[in-house]
Image (tube, rainbow, N blue to C red):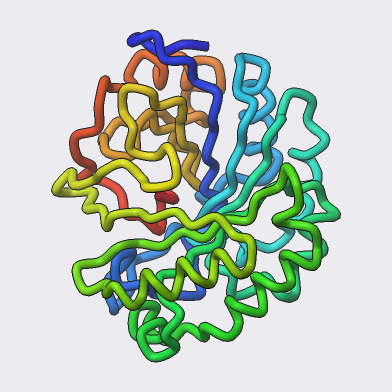
Amino acid sequence: MKDSFGREITYLRISVTDRCNLRCVYCMPEEGIPLVPRSRMLTYEEILRFTSHAVSRGINKVRLTGGEPLVRKGIRTLISDLADMPGIKDLAMTTNGILLSEMAVDLRQAGLQRLNISLDTLDQHRYRTLTRGGDLGKVLEGIHAAKKAGFGAQGSPLKINCVLLPDTTPEDLHALRGFALKEGLELRLIHCMDLKKGSFTRVEGGDGGDCPHCNRIRLTSTGMLKPCLFNNAGFDIRLLGAQKALEEALRGKPAAGSNNTHDTFNYIGG
């Protein structure tokens, strides 16, 4: 399955909710953002139907995002159904880790293969400030629970996502690198992005932001299929149907990202 520029599209990111149990400074304003009514959110059945069609067209990698995906009820069931879907070779999730200590075993048993955990600092006070009240201890407990559950084993790398902010210090990075090395984790450095200004760079330690080789499309929690994070285009799978929406997304995927004035990170999933 190729877009109009000949790029092979094999990667589907699914935002299962715009809700989150943190309020990170780079994701949403302190007062929060109006949430999508639950009646507008895709059901798990709708997500599975679209994903099944996308897999039949060549998608083989799926990542669940949010908001925070672990706050959506019944997420284990969705994971299990996706894990059983023939054609999906890589099933992953990005989480802030707050609920991971109590859910890691269930996620692994359901068939989730890989985890990326957001962690921007190991300083408790700075973490609380960046997340507006988050508990660093819960994230560290979650990381250890994930390792114990089998994430991070061979073929299942456990990754840390660190957003680089203007006030990120060398000490922050040194501590995170040391922690990743000690715990056997892979560290990804993500330069802080701005959707509306169109500010983004390639991810250090990952393949995000590499427009000429981009292989991904995104499905929002309300059913908008977006061909690019930094673009306003979106195609409603409920209105158009899976096949038509996918065709339009492939046709509308730009050569490179520009900016996105319609969406927020908690809604689109980053």
Q: Quick one: 10 or 19, which is closer to the camera?
A: 10
In screen coordinates, is 24 left or right of 199?
A: right
43 shown above or below 118: above
The answer to whether residue 39 shows anywhere in this view is no
In screen coordinates, is 25 left or right of 216?
A: left
Residue that appears at 55% across and 55% down: 186
205 shown above or below 84: below
Residue 191 % position (x, y): 28, 54
Residue that appears at 74% across and 49% down: 112
Residue 53 % position (x, y): 65, 21
Residue that appears at 73% across and 42% down: 155
Q: Quick one: 50 or 132, which is closer to the camera?
A: 132
Residue 160 % position (x, y): 52, 60
Residue 259 % position (x, y): 19, 40
Report which quarter residue 106 is drawn in. bottom right
Q: Quick one: 191 or 93, which is closer to the camera?
A: 191
